[in-house]
Image: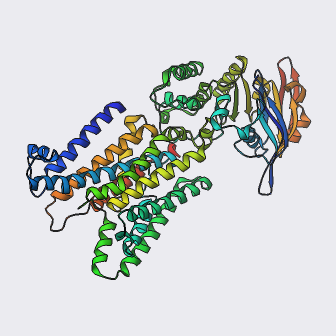
Amino acid sequence: MTELIAKNLSVTAGNARLLDDASLALRPGELIAVLGPNGAGKTTLMRAMLGLVEADQGSTTLDGRDVITLSSTERARTVSYLPQRRPLAWPNRVVDIIALGRFAHGAALGRLSQADAEAVDYAIEACQLRELAHRNADNLSGGELARVHFARALAARTPLLVADEPVAALDPRHQLRIAELIREFVDAGGGALVVLHDVALATRFADRLVWMSSGKILADGSPRDTVSAELMQQVYDVRAHIEFDEHGPDIRIKGI
Amino acid sequence: MTSRHLLVVLVVGCIIAILAACLLGSTPMGLLQVVKALLGQSSAADNIVVWEIRLPRALAAFVVGAALGASGAALQGLLRNPLAEPGVLGVTATSSLSATFALYYGFAATSPLLLPVYAIAGALLATALLAAAAVRIKSVVTLILIGVGLSSFSASVMSLLLNLAPNPFSLADMMNWLLGSVANRSFLDLLTTVPFIAVGLAILFMSRRGLSALTLGDEAASGIGLNLHRQRIAVVLGAGLATGAAVALAGAIGFVGIIAPHIVRPFVNYDPARSLLPSALLAGLILVLADIVVRLMPTSTELKLGVVAALVGAPAFIWIAMQRRVTYD
């Protein structure tokens, strides 16, 4: 089984401790949502777990091997990464952007191997992008573009997925669609680590919540076990009222 | 038109243009005459005109264009900006400055290889500086401003050298250099520069897949498995070698590296990797045609190729800059 395991990761930039002794394991079949205010170290945690920033202390292993020692290609064949900022340099065609997800498998745009073409096709189908496949990216809406980026990550057909705010700046309907796509990916046997800002969305879709503040992981467990007014106060510095019903916690923010 | 059709059209266009460059000139020659001369079967005078004057000149224009076109396309892919180009980023200017030093102090006279070596060293210095800055500075606009700074600095040092030139002959030499020209180039000049251009272009072509990956931005590109560090080094080396050797062959010729990729991009679905080869061919074609215009222009002193390229290229640059949409950032 593929495992991405971070042990006691700490990252410092200048005098600032961006990540402080964080430990976390990502395995297939589990959807983990990382929650926390801006600057809590969520992005740093993901980047450190992928070996994109070097940790001062601690290490991350991917199937027992330190991520720092893996080549970019080896890592990309096991974990796909959807960063927070997704600037497109050119108005490429949707199908080409998705095909870039096959980069680690040696795909070159314009002449895909059969396996690459099949993976791209699968991603297009899964994200319902068939009609948009030959459109150029500069005339897509934000929601469509988010789906295209997700399809790109899906096309890599990796067992694990790490996504940084995949639903940022989307309307509720598109947020739900992306969340459902991630849920489908996990139900099909994948493992996903996802940064979310919407606590309600996270509690609804995730199997496990990881609560972060000031570079530290404060709590890690199922929504039912971790969601509490105290934790909301501690992590987000807001007053919340929480009721549990048969679907899980219902969170209402009362004020600051 | 698909990218394959585009390639065929461009290759045919380049061959026709180079043939035309052999046909046209102060002594007009017929097609049959030129073909015969190319095969060495014509009169001695015709053979000399074609083999010693027109063909090396046309080939020089072509390789210089190809080097600048491919470098421009690769730098645009790396920096993710359609305005990046050896000229705009100050690479050509720094390379010219370094080459002018070799001319000024007479090093260039000691070995035919020294001029290319100096020009390439200057180009590599500039590309390396830009790539190093690109790691820290995320804004491409800032990077282009650094290029403008590099250009201005090189231009001012060059003015200083012109100012201090010991005699009018070296002044004329250096001016020729600054303006950019392929007049009087021999096969020896080609021999000392083309290998560097070939190696530079080979490096760019081998690393072209990474340019597609960079479409997604630095972070996502490393996410999908690109070794960013290696990619940067490859483009710096490749563009530095090709641009430097092109400057050694023809002096400073600007803007072809912007125009050719800009025209090519829509035909290759905006994929930087697939724009490399057609950009090289189109830029080569543009310079061969521009050089024919230069030669046919009935002016008392021959126009310089670099001047003509800039006269067309600079307005095109402004136009492309004004067309830019925010979505590219």
Q: Nearer the viewer, residue A91 or A45?
A: A45
Would you place residue B153 above or below residue A149 in this image?
A: below
- Residue A15 pos. (x, y %): 80, 57
Q: Nearer the viewer, residue B157 or B113?
A: B113
Q: Nearer the viewer, residue A26 or A113?
A: A113
The figure's colour scheme reads rainbow
- Residue A58 pos. (x, y %): 83, 43
Residue at 22% from the left image edge and 47% from the top image edge? B18
Q: Is residue B255 visible?
A: no
Would you place residue A217 above or below residue B143 in this image?
A: above
- Answer with left or right where residue B178 lies relative to residue A126: left
- Residue B136 pos. (x, y %): 62, 55
How many tags in the picture? 0
Residue B92 figure quarter: bottom left
Q: Nearer the viewer, residue A57 or A242?
A: A57
Residue A205 figure quarter: top right
Residue at 76% from the left image edge and 29% from the top image edge? A63
Q: Is residue B65 visible?
A: yes
- Answer with left or right where residue B126 lies relative to residue B250: right
Residue at 18% from the left image edge and 45% from the top image edge? B19
Residue A28 figure quarter: top right
